[in-house]
Amino acid sequence: MNLTTSADVRHARGQFPAWSVKIVLALLVVIGGTGCGATPPAWFRLNMVEATKQKLTPDQERQVATLMTAMFGTPDDPVALPETGLDEAKLRLAAGPVRSDIVGRKNGLYREHCAHCHGVTGDALGPTAAFLNPYPRDYRPGIYKFKSTERADKPTHADLTRILKNGIPGTSMPSFALLSETQIDALVEYVKYLSIRGETELGLMRAYFELDDDAEGKLPETREFLVGEVLEPVAEKWKAAADALIPVPEMPADIDMVASIAKGRELFYGDKANCVKCHGPTGMGDGQANDYDDWNKTIVEWTKEVVGTDDKQWANRAHRVLDGDSLEPRTIPPRNLRRGIYRGGRRPLDLYYRIHAGINGAPMPAAKGTVPPEDIWHIVNYVRSLPYELDGELGADRPMVARDRF
Amino acid sequence: MASATIGTSSTARSTVNWPCVVAWMLVATTALLLSFGALVTTYDAAMAVPDWPGTFGHNMFLYPLVEWFWGPWDLFLEHGHRLLGATAGLLSLVLAAVTFRRGASPAVRWLVVAAVVLVVVQGALGGLRVILDDKTVAKVHACTGPLFFAVATAIAVLAGRQGRGESSGSTTERSEPVLHDPFVAVGSLSLPLPSWAVGASLPTALAVAAYLQLVAGAQLRHADATLAPSTFRWMVAIHLAGAAAVTVLSALTVIAWQPHESRAARRWSLTILAMVMGQLLLGGGAWLFTWGVPSWLQEAWAPAEAVLARSPRGAAVITGHVILGMMILGAAVVLALEWGGAERLERIARFGRQGRGRSDGTGKPLSGAVALQTRPERGAR
C-alpha cells in the first residue's frame, strides 16, 4: 500500500511534462542566444580615460583612431614602422587569433597566453582583470617595475624575458617557462609593441592641447610630426634601455655577513634610507599603506577632478568612461619583507636593483643618491635576512612578529 | 559501468540487449570525446588543423596515424577529437539501427532521434568553429557536447531497464521510493520531507543544474579576450551561484533518498555528492592555476613561486574540472531515470496519451517495466 501512496503523490503532480518542456525550450533559447551574432574581429580600444581627460571631441577621437591604425595596424595585422625598432616577423607570431601553421607552430601567442588578463590592447582590461590583485600591468604608459635599468628608463629585452620566464611570485602573473625561447621572444617583442603603441597614443592625445588655433583642432597628418615628433622619442627610449643598465659594484667576496646585516639594519631604520616609513617597524609592510601606484593614481585623481567639475556634460561622459574603462582603484601595500617573496626576483642582484632604483610606478623610492652603492649591498643583506631574523639574534630589540601585534 | 552498480537479479539470457550495449559504448566514446574536447580548449588547440572536414587536405580517416600520434600535441588533440567525434557519430547511427529494429519504447526512440540530430549538429558546429575560426561557435559547441552526453546516458539507462523489464519484470518495487509517512527518518534525525523531495524531481533538477553549470563554465572558458571585466565578473558570479545550487541539490537528494529502499539508489546519490565535493575542489584548483591565489587568501597563503602556465598539472586540474562536471551530469541523469524518472519520461514521450492515469483499476499505475511489457511490439512473446 505504501507503493500506492507514493505513486499517488507523484501522480498528483502530473504537470511535470508541461514545465519540463518549458525548461527545454528555455535552454534552447539560452544556447541559441549565445550563438546569435558571430564574434567580431579583435580591435584596439582607444584610451578613453585619456581621451576624456583631454576633452577630445568625437572627431578628434576618430582622428586618433585612424592615425593609430595607420601607424600600428590592428591586433590581427600589426605594423612595425622601421623607427620603432621592432621586428615585424616576431610581432606576427604573437599577434592575431590563436592557430597553428603548417609545421604545427602556434601563432596568436599573445591572445592565447596573455590577453585574458592584460587585454587585447594591453590596457589591463582583460576579462579576468577584476579578479586579480594586483591588477595586471597596463602596458600603455610604458612603465615597468622589475628591471635592471634606472627608475625612469625602459626595461631591457632581457628584463622582460626574465619576467616571462619566472612570472611574478605573489601575483597572478604566471611563469611561461614552458614556452620556447622563440615564443617568449615574440611575446616580449609584442609587449614592447603594445607599450610603444600606447605611449604614442598618449602622445597624440596630449598633442591636441598644444595645437595652434589655425589647426582647427586637427593634428597635422605628416610623417614628420607623427613619426618624428611623437613616435620616435618613445621608440628611442626603448632602444636606449640596453645601455642604461644600473652599474652594480661587486659585493666584496670576503664581506663579514653579520656586520653587513647589522649595518643594513641600521640603514633600514635610519633617516636616510627610511625604509621603515613604509615597510614598518616590523618589516611586515605595516607602515604607510594608503598610497596608490601610478596606474591607480591616474584614476583616483581623475575621479576627483570629475567630481569637482562644473561641466556636467563632461562629467557624465567621464563617469561612463570610468564605469566601462577602468577598475575600482586599489591602494598598494608596501611589501611584507618577512615572507621572502620577491616579485622582481630573489637573487641578491634583483634586490640591489629594486633598492637602488626603487620600483617604478609604485611608491617605493630609489635609494640611489641618498645611500652609497656599497651600503645598498648591506641593505640587501639585511632584507634577505629578514625572513629568518630571530629573537635577539641581531641587536637587542627583538623585532616584532605577527603574534605580538595580535 | 553504471548499469553494473544497479545490478539486480536479472536472469541470464542468451540474447544480448544490443541497444543497451551500443548505448553504453556510445556513452564511453562520448566521455573520451568530450575529454579530448576539453583538452583542446585547455590547450587552445582548436585551430591546430586549419581545414575541415579534411585534415590538412587528407580525408580525416586517412590522415597518417603515425603523423597524428607523434605529431605536435595540439594536432594530436584536435585530430583525435575529430576521430572520436566521427566514431560517436557512427555509433549513434548504429544505435538508431538497433533500437528501431528492436522496437524500443517511445522515449528511447525520441532520445535516439535526438542523439542523431545532436551529433550531426555538433559535428557541423565543430566544423564551423574551425572554418569560421569563431569563438561564439566554440561556445555553442561546448554546450551541445554535454547535452549529447546526457542524451546518450539516458538512452543507455532506458535501454537497460527495458532489457531487464523483459527478463524479470520485477523492477516495480525497486523503482519506487518508499515513503512511509511524510516524516522520514534521516539517520537519527526525523526531517519532514515535502512531497516534491521524493521521486525523480530532485535528481532531475540536479541534472538540469549540472548541465546549466557546464554551460556557464563553457562561457568562462571561451570568454573572448575583448570581454569587459564587469561582464566577466557577472559570469563568474553565475558560475559560483550554480556551484552552490548543484551542491545544495546533491545534498538534498542524499537526504531525501536516505530512506530509499534500494541500496544502489542511496549509494548512487552519495556518489554524486562525493563527485560534487571533488568538483568544488577542482574548481578551486582551476581558479588557482588560472588566476593565482585570490587576494583574501594571500595573507594566509602565498606560494613563493609564480604559477607555471600550461603545466601538465594545471591542465589536468582545469580539464578535470570540465570532465568531472560532465560525469556529474551523467550520474544525475542515471539517478533521475533509474529510480522514478523513466516512467515519467515514457509518459512524456507518449505525450500523455496512454501513460497518464492509465491504471488497471487497482489504483496502481503502471510502472515503466509493466507498461513496456504491455506494448504491442512485445507481442512476439
Image (spheres, rainbow, N blue to C red):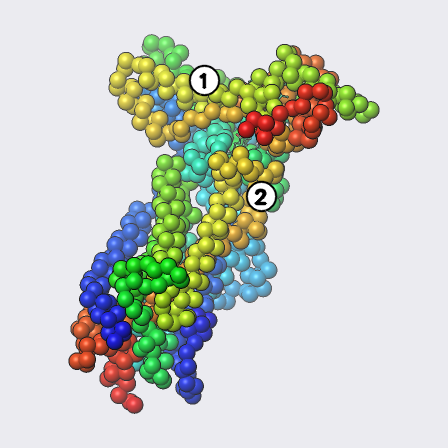
Q: Nearer the viewer, residue B230 or A333?
A: A333
Image quadrant assignment for residue B199: bottom left
Residue located 65% across and 13% down the image: A270
Eyeballing the image, is B131 above or below B69?
A: above
Residue located 41% across and 22% down the image: A299
Residue located 31% across and 77% down the image: B172
Number of numbered discs visible in the structure rendering: 2
Residue extending farthest bottom: B381
In the picture of the structure, the residue carrying the numbered disc 1 is A225
Residue located 48% across and 36% down the image: B296
The C terminus of chain A: image quadrant: top right
Residue B367 visible in the shown view: yes
The local crowd at label 1, few if under 14, some if 14 to 19, many if 20 or more residues have their Cα within 10 Å, is some
Residue extending farthest right: A254
Q: Chain of mark 1?
A: A
Amino acid bearing label 2: Leu
Residue extending farthest top: A213
**Mark 2 residue element:** loop
**Mark 1 residue element:** helix
The local crowd at label 2, few if under 14, some if 14 to 19, many if 20 or more residues have their Cα within 10 Å, is many
Q: Position of residue B117 (x, y in %)?
A: 32, 65
In the picture of the structure, the residue carrying the numbered disc 2 is B308
Task: Measure the C-alpha gap from mark 1 to mark 2.
Answer: 44 Å
Q: Position of residue B62 (x, y in %)?
A: 50, 67
Amino acid bearing label 1: Phe
Q: In the rendered view, does B347 fall on the left or right side of B160? A: left
Q: Chain of mark 2?
A: B
Residue B24 visible in the shown view: no
Q: Mark 1 or 2, which is nearer the eye?
A: 2
